[in-house]
Image (cartoon, grey):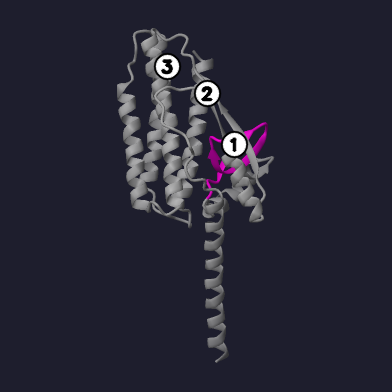
Amino acid sequence: MKRRASKFFVLLFSIVCVCACVFVAKLLSSAITVSGNGITQSTSFQGFEIYAVSLGQYSSKSQAESTCESIAKKGGAGYIYETNNMYYVLASAYEKENDAKLVQENLSSSGISSKIIKIGVSSVDFLNASSSAQKKAFSSALAELKNAYVSLYDISVSLDTNSYDDAKAKIEIICVKGNLETALEKISKGSSSYDGIYYQMIKNTFNSVVDNLNDIKNYQVTNNISLSAKIKFAYINLIEEINSLTDLLNNKV
């Protein structure tokens, strides 16, 4: 009888632990979700800033890595962002500072401390492009990358608010991927060596982003890390890719 009672309490304790983990995950996911990022799709590219919410900062990458998975399991991105020799574990990112502040307030009311990290992305003038039409084409390509960020953000919100299930979200991911592939096909290589360099840099970034989207559309939930968390990771990574690309375009040509 004692043995049966012991097994019952072990089972009950396990159920409580699982429920607690699910509750914490829902709590964080809800707190960092701001419906409607308020960003419209664009056909031209200008510099912009995003405001990321960090749930931890560390002096070494290994320390940051130790918390990534736990944040991802709670619905956050679990993305490591390095700046000024510090490593921040990001949960989400927003183009409006007020949205990030709202999330910070939501987290604080739930007993979770956070920090807002501003990430700036530079504009690109394409000064060495062969023509104004070529500059416009390259700018449109960069705008399509930013549009992909907007779309991924919206998909993650739709998942967190139960407007989408995983199947619907993956269909939308395929659409984002298709838009990028179509945009890349429309870019002209231009008529000068500078045009060719610009084109190759942009193409490399497009291919990298498309590869990441392929991974997401094929993602099966593992280690209790949701599709929404993977998408948050992907859209922050996309901002980093755009940032690296604009730095290259401005400094290497």
Q: Which residue is mark 3?
A: 198
Residue 215 lies left or right of residue 98; in this view the side is: left
Residue 236 in picture, x, y percent from top left: 51, 38
The nearer-to-camera label among 3 and 1 is: 1
Specify the amino acid type for callout 1: Glu
Asked which secondary structure carries label 3, the reply is helix
Q: Tell me, for residue 226, which label it has, or none.
A: none
Specify the amino acid type for callout 2: Gly
Residue 9 in picture, x, y percent from top left: 56, 80
Given residues 57 and 96, the one toward you in this image is 96
- Magenta part mainly helix, strand or loop? strand
Asked which secondary structure carries label 1, the reply is helix
The nearer-to-camera label among 3 and 2 is: 2
**Sequence order check, earlier mark of 3 and 2:** 2
Q: Which residue is mark 1?
A: 97
**Sequence order check, earlier mark of 1 and 2:** 2
